[in-house]
Image (cartoon, coloured by chain):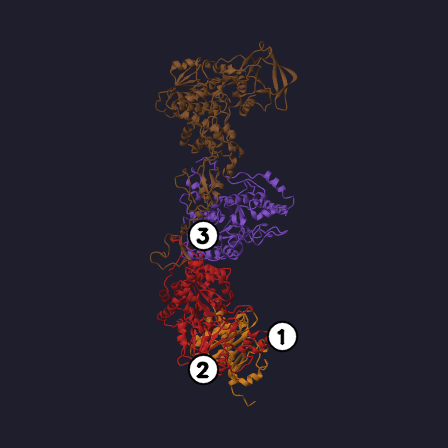
Amino acid sequence: MASQLEGSLAVARTVARCRPQVVCAYPITPQTHIVEALSRLVGSGELAPCEFVNVESEFAAMSVAIGASATGARAYTATASQGLLFMAEALFNASGLGLPIVMTVANRAIGAPINIWNDHSDAMALRDCGWLQLYATSSQEAADMHVQAFRLAERCSLPVMVCMDGFVLTHAFEPLEVPDAAAVDSYLPPFQPRQVLDPLDPVTIGAMVGPEAFTEVRYLAHAKQLEALDEIPALAQEFEAGFGRASGGLLSGYRCEGADTIVVALGSVLGTLEEVVDERREQGAAIGAVAIKSFRPFPSAELRAALSGGRRVVVLERAFSVGVGGIVSGDVHAALSGLGLPLHTVVAGLGGRAITRRSLHAMLDELDGDRLGELHFLELDREVVERELTRGRDHARPGPHAENILRELGVVGAGPV
Amino acid sequence: MFEVRIHGRGGQGVVTAAELLALAAFEDGLQAQAFPSFGSERMGAPVTAFCRIDDAPIRRREPIAEPDAVVVQDPTLLHHVDVFGGVRDGGFILVNSSRDADALGLGELLERHGPTRLLTVPASEIARARLGRPIPNAALLGGLVALTEIVSPGSLERAISQRFNGAAAANNARAAHDAHVQAAAQLARRAAPARTDG
Amino acid sequence: MSDATSPHQSPGTDGGPPRPFAITLDVGSSLANRTGAWRTERPQYVRRLPPCNDACPAGEDVQRWLYEAESGGAGYERAWRALVRENPFPAVMGRICFHPCETACNRCELDEGVGINSVERFLGDEAIRRGWTLPAPGGPSGRRVLVVGAGPCGLSAAYHLALRGHHVTVRDGAEEPGGMMRYGIPAYRLPREVLDAEIDRILALGVELRCDEPVSDLRAELREGGYDAALLAVGAQLARNVDIPGGTAAHVIDAVSMLRGVATGEPPRLGRRVVVYGGGDTALDAARSARRLTGSEPLLIYRRSRERMPAHAEELAQAEQEGIAFRWLSTISAAGEGHIEVERMRLDENGEPQPTGELERLEADSVVLALGQSSDLTLLEGLDGVRAGDGVVEVDERMMTGAAGVFAGGDMTPSERMAAVAIGHGRRAARHLDGWLNDVPTADPPRGELAGFDALNTWYYADAPRTVRPLLEDVRRQSTFEEVVHGLDADSALYEARRCLSCGNCFSCDNCYGVCPDNAVLKPGPPGEPYAIDLDYCKGCGICAAECPCGAIEMVPEEI
Amino acid sequence: MSTRFYQTGTFAIGNRLLEPAEASAQADPDRANSLTKGHRACQGCGEALGARYALDAAVRATGGRVIAANATGCLEVFSTPFPESSWRLPWIHSLFGNAPAVATGIAAALRAQGRTGTRVVAQGGDGGTVDIGLGCLSGMFERGDDVLYICYDNEAYMNTGVQRSAATPHAARTATTEPVGRQTGNPFGQGKNLPLIAMAHEIPYVATATVAELRDLERKVARAMELRGPRYLHVLVPCPLGWGSDPAQTIAVARLAKETGLFPVFEAEEGRMTGVSPIRRLLPVEDYLRTQRRYAHLFGDPGHPETVARLQREANRNIERFGLLAEPGEDGEPGRRGDLLEILETDGGERG
């Protein structure tokens, strides 16, 4: 039964019901409310047995989780932004060792310039670290995903990141339902590790592997993630059956039937996007939206199926790969190869800039007028960047690439492409 | 959907105000979404919080650009921040002040919105009297409820008692009640027809 | 604590989910990697010759019996049995031997030499106290051997010959057996009951002893006695005299007869002021005996300096403690009634004393001459091939005289005149004599490589100064012939035994087993059993050899 | 047995006549061999020796209920190259700098599982400990986690080819501190004295040891295992390859480091010194330095006598600061002050 809760608190309470035995915490905005709440739950004895470890860095947080998980304990932590990057080495290690740790990432931009607000640069920077990456579209889904994440992690013996937009979800105060404790217990069996540090049955974990077997080890990691493509929908289905609520899964479509234009996005922007879709549908536009909820593993086949009916695709991203463009759109493009669908990448909401219905409408109007470039930066203050670029041009001669960027921005030779 | 935007400074309980309002709406069986305009929380810095109230689940997650109501917890912001930006004609405006709209230089705004749309209440004074501290948020909510009737006074009281404990809960409830009474009185006076006879 | 049972079923095994490939390994699987292939040198256990053994005139395996003694308890008997394999006189030698073993001991370079002699005495006394018996003689060989002289050499030979099953007859001119052990060494150094006990133990093997029966004509004895071979060990009983002017007037006697008189209970009259002339151990024995007989402090006169005195330091020290007076670099140039004349000497560049002409008159009631002894070789007359001269008999490397089947040893052959040497002679002569009887060639066994101090890693030996044997308090040493030096109690003996560094011979300290970084030293047997090198894994680093305390491991190159 | 073994003292590893209880764990025919044969350590590797010594002692102290976490480094690489592991106890390697935190996680898990009888040992080389792992180590200390951390100090990054670490002593040659021209090898040296840094955390137990004194090392591991909370053991382990010393002399070189006073062997509880193992046969530092090619440039022509003197002063400071000539425990002998005075004179009267 729902109550008016902050997203962070709902996640914390849900995590507690998953009975983690070791929780490590290091403060970083906007993740702090989650671990603060968990420390209270451990302190009050509501979450027991559980060791709440205040570590000295995110690197240590993940390392403690690695040790705990390898000893057969269900381990959890949460972080964001710089913290996630500071963990990077340990993240690869946790997945390499096949340790089913679950971590909440309260997505936040990466500095410099330092910026505490939301975008997806942090998680996207670590998309190749071997973790499964789930993106929640709402706080409710974020909470629910954690229940599924522990089950998924332990089933595949792989670590799972649950990404929820910092502030937008973590700090939003809404009617939310914390998954019922009994239901969680029946959905999530006790952790049976695939390997455990135990004097009664000793093993050596973390051997050095040379060229003779390294490729195989990496391939097996890939194969395990692909297996997760089957696990994730099954777990989502089972969750819906047990909790009476649809949450998670690989992806979900919104009003895609008969849609010419389909906007693909990850995370909390989906709510606003759905309203925009409704509004344009009312004006007769054939438009729909698709939420990617599992970015790693990437549901190529499912996405291809969902988009193949459309005539053009817009990938709305909260991060981008400097010097190239879209990150998600690269994978989408690969998934759609051969279909010849025009694909536009729209980079939006960087460093906490709000993605509003108005800006989305404006962008889609550009699209309708065929004025939207392949790479579009939503609400980019063109005057500012042009002034800066011109200033720079006086000092350094730009190569063709810089020209192209300007063209992308529609600054040079704007108009029908 | 009814959208409220609350302006104040860090330490004045701006975010709490938005959450209390949402909680009250939840008590009334409505859907509500409260969220801050996220800045690094510093005492005294301008802070904005938002609250949406609707019958249907709320999906949009953008800041409120065109509020149905604006609450100004600190009149000193009037000259620094565009607190009334986007508020529609006829939208509700509640300012924390012991002075009236004219004294605050809001006469023209009062004209545009009409007498039953713009109020000032001495929330800080009320809070000082009830809590011993000038934390105006609860009182302002009392005034807002009187002004907009978006949630029921009882739900606001329940929200306050959920959010605060013991004396704090009781005192904030009283502060809200006082402000509610004062605001209601003002509205009543303004609604009353003007006398012609001496 | 629920540690006994793991909270998890063991994964990877009994049907659990498979462990991750490659990153998770089974424990101990590196046994498949035979690192022995890296080796260019291999460690090898060796036995080196301990300096004590090397120095022992009696040929004892000192390190071996100390090793046994280190166990204490039952180890003492094992130690004694190891000891008497060579020397049947531990209790005697434990008293009168001048123990060159202790001088040679590597421990001298660490703190002080191991008190080998005192442990030997402890073992000897234990044996007497507990009545341990010598090994049974071998089956009768049917051969008869005549041993002339019941001194240390003769009795030692008799013992070893008896063990070989030969019938041994020991003849001696004195009333009682023991030779110089009985008639030369004063009782305060060697109580007679100790000597008797160890001699009786030899006789108990069936050795025939005939005292008061000197052999004057060996040739005749051999023929008539039907002996197959003989060993001569008559010692050196004749005192060397010098002609001192006026000596006839003075009361001059020789140390040999004086000591013999003391031993037989007919001490000579010496007066109050006794002068002993000489610098050897006999001189000291005479002086110390005189101290006891006269109750006054004798003067010892020696022509060389203190440093060049042949007597053993220990004896000298005890003599000084007992109040013996010394006059170095002096000779007696004349002696008269109640006085002597002494000439001061100086050492020339060769360290030889030269007269200075400075004379001095000293009071003296008697002069005891202790200027050395020689052997009475008259019994050899008529025996073909025997070469003798300067009071000694020449023997070959087998200790056989020029006469076939006639062997000789002890003081009557050219060598240091010391009981231990005599005992060693007896042992060696017996071996060669036995070989000669059976017509098998015998040679002394080759000496092993000496375990010098440099071969040791002395870090591992805790610092432990030697125990000092309790001495008889001075007053009683001025009047009585009670034994001066007492034995060690069991604890001190154990302490002393355990000071042994076990030079060149493994004593199972487990260092090699412990210090190998590759666990390549094996401990197959119970404690004390030898270790083994696991060549499948030994990388040949050499730490085991470097850290072996006693130098019992050496590195040898691998054949490649 | 009332009489001590003067023959072997308590310095040798065992003795045929010792009661098993009196012998070291390494003397036991059935010892754990936590690090077993077949590993790929160099000949005469001090770290291989130290690790087996320490972990076997821990196994003995806990009845075999130990889990080990290992930092990246020589020890990890030579003990676990796929497909062979030389470990015989539960062991995990995660990263270079996080062994203390991984151990914290293991301890936390054991606590949550109620398996507090199983103990945790974390281990790493000096690089993983005093440099890249120091943050995690300090955090582990400060939180009071029940972990024994063992640093096997071979005074440089050996696994990567002998580069300088913060534990590299002054003047030592490494691949990144080549003595060139007037340079004399590592210009810094012993800037991070981790045992003292650990003591500053006032943790229950801090101790130093060397592979030259096994019994001392084992006693310290046993003591550490009697205590709960963070404990730190710093073991000097010579590296023949990196130090340019004779593989056969690994133990001898470690012994010299202690006997010259360059490596003080002591223990402390709750930040207070509780004991030192005194110098038994005091020697000048030169005797130690000359055993290693990493110091060869100090004795070449012209050589660097002033640097040798500085190192001697370091040793003398240790001797005074830690009281290394204090009356010994039961088996040593008193340090020889006379010798010290002689050696003190070699420091040219200067005082650093």
Numbered badge on residue C209: none
Q: Residue B131: give x, y in percent of width and height.
A: 52, 70
Q: Residue A191: give x, y in percent of width and height.
A: 38, 61
Q: Which chain is orange?
A: B
Chain letter of the residue carrying label 1? A
Residue ID for mark 1: A394
Q: Closer to the observer: label 1 or label 2?
A: 1
Q: Nearer the viewer, residue B144 or D300?
A: D300
Is residue A148 in sight in this rendering? yes
Q: Colour of chain A?
A: red
Chain letter of the residue carrying label 2? A
User: The residue tagged with tag 2: helix, strand or loop?
Assistant: helix
Q: Closer to the observer: label 2 or label 3?
A: 3
Name the residue furthest top: C249
Residue in view at x 44 percent, y 33 percent? C67
Look at the picture and state if C260 lies above or below D182. above
User: The residue tagged with tag 3: helix, strand or loop?
Assistant: helix
Asked whether disc 1 touches disc 2, contact meaning CB atoms under 8 Å apart, the reply is no
Residue ID for mark 3: D79
The quarter of the image holding the C terminus of chain C is top left
Q: Which chain is brown?
A: C
Find the distance from the CA under tag 1 to the CA under tag 3.
60 Å
Q: What's the residue type where badge 2 is placed?
A: Glu
Find the distance from the CA under tag 2 to the CA under tag 3.
65 Å
Q: What's the residue type where badge 1 is placed?
A: Asp
